[in-house]
């Protein structure tokens, strides 16, 4: 037992006497404490973040094009409103995430949530295309400060053997959002209200975000070395945990050499290709799945909204299972290959089967499961493999920005004039999913080769041995990648 662990293990009773506790027990207690405070709030925030960016798909079936886009017979204006979010989201991801290192996570995350909630709420007042476009652009600016920063924030508290599952819980709420959004849209569609259904949808999904962001300002823990949420002994253990395996530029500092290293790392750009394909599928899935399912002949618009729920529910369950297994086996790449391949097969079925609607509906499960599981695993993969905090803060939004360009492409692949076949959309998305699978295989092979090369040169390090990555980040001789 280390001296540091001894300090943590010796806890004072109420009468001042000391009792020696097992360090493993103390760590489990700390982990439960962190999970109960961090995960519920960040997960629910992501649910509303995803609702606020993807609710256009449901609003489209509730009369938004007729009320605010002049009917939009070709769907071109709707495509641009959907894509506008991703333009600013892409441009602001890297600068916002690097800047977030200088600020308290609770203030940064809470403030961004309040701002994007206001943007989403104000969308309910739009009456024309320019107003909707400006609201979506502003929504992208504000949400760009949230998603990548939360992924970085998790790395402040969770070790590499815990991180993938936590990211899965968090990202899984995107799938929950898809299911919940469908249920909410179904309920609104059948409600007797004085305003347009799509306006009510934006209000009900935007206002809670403002309240959650305000709550976040007060109860989300800050950085582990300074948060009042933890006792001094717990803070010491939390810092020891994040230094386990690596010791780098922790705190409100930025190592600009690591910023440059991120821009020069070829693997980040390969990850960007993977993320591009996945986000093309994800962006089109969230915006057009209700429309695609409505072409399958299930009946009313309300029923089509409801039929969106099962694919998202299955994706959320598969996401947690895949990520748990990935954490336990310490393997990411092969799971991503499997997920991308499954999604590609789903698109092939949609492309090739035109008359059996039950088979076509089954294929939406394949697409949803493959897309959601792969995105979460890519995020978990690179959080560890970039080595240092600054390189993570730069590299993750960098490949994320490249990947989000796929969302812009996905926004233009399903014009109404090409339905119900959508051959161009299904063919492009399926090809990109198979390309992502190939890239993931190349990355996992390169990581395995590099780990073996370092083992041969420097010897095999002990599991979770502390590695100083403050200078070389992931290029440190004792650093080992998760393949």
Image (cartoon, rainbow, N blue to C red):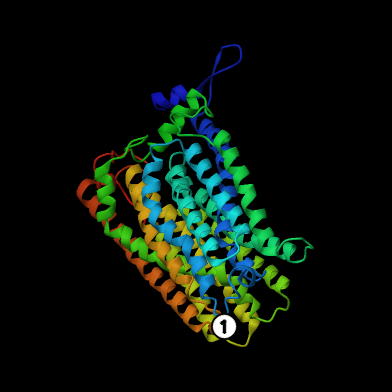
Instruction: Give above or below for 87 relative to 28.
Output: below
Q: How far across and down, in percent of the image, does residue 291 sit?
A: 61, 74
Left or right: residue 457 versus residue 113 is left
Q: Residue at x 45, y 30 (%)?
A: 237
Instruction: Give above or below for 8 relative to 380.
Output: above
Q: Residue at x 48, y 76 (%)?
A: 413
Residue 332, image quadrant: bottom left
Q: Which residue is mark 1?
A: 419
Q: How far across and down, in percent of the image, does residue 320 sit?
A: 56, 56
Q: Residue at x 69, y 58 (%)?
A: 200
Quarter of the image with the C terminus is: bottom left
Near-viewer residue (73 or 237): 73
Q: Most extreme residue toward the bottom, as rendered?
A: 355
Callout 1 secondary element:
loop
Quarter of the image with the N terminus is: top left
Any part of residue 345 in sight: yes
Q: Most extreme residue toward the right, as rendered?
A: 192
Q: How far across and down, in percent of the image, does residue 107 sit?
A: 49, 37
Left or right: residue 473 versus residue 422 is left
Q: How far across and down, in percent of the image, does residue 146 sit?
A: 48, 48
Instruction: Give above or below for 415 relative to 210.
Output: below
Any part of residue 482 in sight: no
């Amino acid at each position: 037992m280390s001296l540091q662990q001894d300090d943590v293990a010796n806890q004072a009773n109420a009468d001042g006497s000391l009792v020696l506790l097992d360090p493993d027990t103390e760590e489990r207690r700390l982990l439960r404490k962190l999970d109960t405070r961090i995960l519920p709030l960040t997960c629910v925030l992501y649910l509303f973040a995803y609702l606020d960016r993807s609710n256009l798909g449901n609003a489209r079936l509730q009369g938004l094009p007729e009320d605010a886009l002049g009917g939009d017979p070709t769907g071109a204006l709707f495509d641009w409103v959907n894509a506008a979010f991703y333009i600013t989201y892409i441009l602001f991801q890297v600068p916002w995430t690097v800047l977030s290192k200088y600020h308290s996570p609770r203030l940064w995350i809470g403030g961004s949530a309040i701002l994007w909630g206001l943007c989403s709420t104000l969308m309910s007042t739009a009456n024309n295309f320019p107003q909707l476009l400006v609201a979506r652009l502003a929504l992208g600016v504000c949400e760009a400060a949230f998603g990548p920063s939360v992924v970085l924030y998790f790395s402040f508290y969770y070790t590499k053997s815990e991180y993938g599952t936590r990211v899965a819980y968090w990202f899984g709420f995107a799938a929950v959002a898809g299911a919940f959004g469908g249920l909410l849209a179904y309920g609104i569609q059948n409600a007797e209200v004085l305003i347009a259904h799509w306006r009510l949808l934006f209000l009900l999904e935007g206002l809670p975000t403002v309240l959650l962001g305000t709550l976040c300002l007060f109860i989300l823990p800050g950085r582990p070395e300074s948060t009042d949420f933890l006792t001094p002994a717990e803070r010491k253990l939390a810092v020891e945990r994040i230094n386990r395996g690596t010791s780098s530029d922790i705190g409100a500092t930025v190592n600009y050499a690591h910023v440059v290293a991120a821009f020069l790392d070829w693997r980040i750009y390969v990850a960007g290709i993977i993320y591009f394909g996945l986000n093309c599928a994800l962006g089109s899935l969230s915006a057009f799945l209700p429309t695609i399912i409505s072409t399958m002949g299930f009946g009313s618009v309300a029923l089509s909204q409801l039929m969106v729920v099962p694919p998202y529910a299955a994706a959320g369950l598969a996401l947690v299972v895949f990520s748990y297994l990935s954490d336990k086996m310490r393997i990411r790449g092969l799971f991503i290959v499997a997920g991308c391949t499954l999604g590609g097969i789903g698109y092939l079925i949609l492309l090739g089967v035109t008359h059996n609607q039950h088979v076509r509906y089954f294929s939406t499960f394949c697409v949803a499961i493959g897309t959601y599981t792969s995105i979460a695993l890519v995020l978990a993969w690179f959080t560890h493999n970039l080595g240092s905090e600054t390189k993570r803060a730069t590299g993750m939004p960098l490949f994320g920005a490249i990947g989000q360009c796929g969302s812009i492409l996905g926004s233009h692949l399903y014009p109404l004039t090409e339905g119900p076949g959508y051959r161009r959309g299904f063919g492009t998305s399926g090809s990109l999913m198979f390309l992502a699978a190939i890239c993931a295989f190349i990355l996992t092979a390169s990581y395995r080769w590099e780990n073996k090369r370092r083992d041969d040169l420097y010897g095999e390090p002990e599991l979770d041995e502390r590695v100083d990555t403050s200078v070389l980040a992931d290029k440190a001789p004792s650093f080992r990648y998760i393949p």
